[in-house]
Amino acid sequence: MLFFNHFGRYLLMLKGMFTKPENWRMYWKELMHQCVEIGIGSLGIVVIISVFMGAVSAVQTSYQLVSPLIPLTTIAQIVRDTVILEFAPTVVCIVLAGVVGSKIASELGNMRVSEQIDALEIMGINTKSYLIMPKIMACLITIPLLVILSMGLGIYGGRLAGVATKILSADTYDQGLLLNFVPYNVFFALVKAYTFAFIISTIPSYYGYYVKGGALEIGRSSTKSVVVSCVMILFADYILAALLLGK
Amino acid sequence: MIEFKNLKKAFGDKIVLDDVSHVMETGKANLIIGQSGSGKTVLQKCLVGLFEPDEGEIIYDGVSFTDMNIEQRKELRQQIGMLFQGSALFDSMTVEQNIMFPLDMFTSQGFSDKLARVNEVLKRVNLEGVNKKYPAELSGGMKKRVGIARAIVLNPKYLFCDEPNSGLDPQTSMVIDKLILDITREFNMTTVINTHDMNSVMEMGENIIYLFDGKKEWSGNRKDIIFSKNERLNKFIFASEFLQDAKDMRMLEATGKIANDRNMDDMLK
């Protein structure tokens, strides 16, 4: 019963966002601000995670491929496909659910508790539209870009680690990258990125917007929003894989 | 003028407002007073539309607020200013940006015009030279004044103040009270103040409604309070022996039993 209550309010929140903005210029300004906060703000962590993810998967793949019959180019192929299909969209989005999600939930929660949202409502501003919509749009714009960047950096990280540990040469790695490349995998990764971006922005917005109480409740709702977002990402990951990759 | 008729509001089984009616007059400081939990905040939130009353009607200058659609309410709200208990200033914005925000959102003025208006209202609340400060750098009284400046920047017809003196020392409270009263008269606004500060009640209560347990228990002005026989009101307003003595003195003054221009130094010699 509680689930339906939350889900109903979540849908009403999304519906409430779609009204004509009071001032397009202010909404645009807020969207740009959120793009910087979410996109540029998460750039550092995405770069670090992606490079190391690719590097570790190159080293671990070579460790498992003990047969001399398997060509070394396979390592590059495996790193490429793992990074594109799973690591870049899913792992990066789970990390972003923590980084961006907690930020969104605590920002909105603090605004709610300190009556800043009420102040905006009194001014005649649709707070769902002004506060939540730009965050969702910013996530939908920047997170797929971060995922694309992560794909590139992950693959490059694998190359760096492969060469540094003398598992394979740079030429062999580059050769492997071009073998049996399936562009559909990139499309699949982007579908996942957009879906996860929606989850990362809307669930924390819901928990932050409807928070009641004080500082303790803001912390709790922030944690809850991250946990629920991560579970939903994993659930959506499975559904999308079954729908788009299932035979 | 804001009129509300037979307002009822309940949260679950708990009735918070029970058949409350009153008229808030233009150009006056209209006070809602009552103990904590008596329903004054809920009444104020119903009046501004943050809560929807279960029954009853709210009328702004002859137009029913209750019957308005979302767009009409949004339009009316541009004529409403509100000072919140905790000031509700936007933390990430400077004082100037906070006050300019309603102008940015609802006017097409150029930056220099908006800045001139911001400086004008800051001057009006006696708070010049703080444009670039952030709310965290301001004292409680200064935050309240910035809150008032933001509330009046669009020249509203209605001003709502939720506990404007909470957390302030008596002297600063009086400054804020005087400011609200002066602004109300200067701009001929309908000001609704939610308070349980007795100094405020006695200093600016021109039209007072006393709520007890969600019901309207008494209404009148600050002079009426002195002579009121309502036991609950007297217990609430003159809670201490000191305040009771002060009330007795005022009654003696008002009935001419003692002179109100008496010289205390002479009397104590």
Image (cartoon, grey):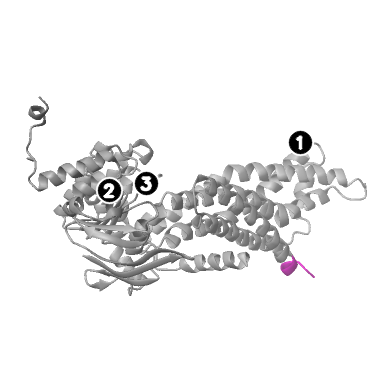
Whole-number angstrom distance, CA of label 2 to CA of label 3: 24 Å
| Amino acid of disc 1 | Ala
Circles 2 and 1: CB distance less than 8 Å? no
Whole-number angstrom distance, CA of label 2 to CA of label 1: 80 Å
- Residue B141, horizontal then vertical, whole percent: 29, 39
Note whether residue B151 is visible. yes
Q: Nearer the viewer, mark 3 or mark 1?
A: 3
Residues indicated by labels 2 and 1 sit on the same polypeptide chain: no
| Amino acid of disc 2 | Ile
User: Residue shown at 53%/66% (left/top)?
Assistant: A9
SS at circle 3: loop
Name the chain under label 1: A
SS at circle 2: helix
According to the image, label 3 marks what residue? Answer: B86
Give the quadrant of the N terminus of chain B.
bottom left
- Residue B69, horizontal then vertical, whole percent: 35, 73
First in sequence: mark 2 vs mark 3: 3
Between A163 and B27, the one nearer to me in the picture = B27
SS at circle 1: helix
A245 is within the stretch colored magenta: yes
Q: Nearer the viewer, mark 2 or mark 1?
A: 2
User: Residue shown at 39%/56% (left/top)?
Assistant: A118
Tag of residue B237: 2
Left or right placement of residue A176 versus residue A114 in this view: right
Tag of residue A164: 1
Res B94 → quadrant: top left
Which residues are the magenta region? Answer: A242-247
Q: Is residue A7 above or below residue A175?
A: below
B212 is within the stretch colored magenta: no
- Residue A100, horizontal then vertical, whole percent: 56, 50
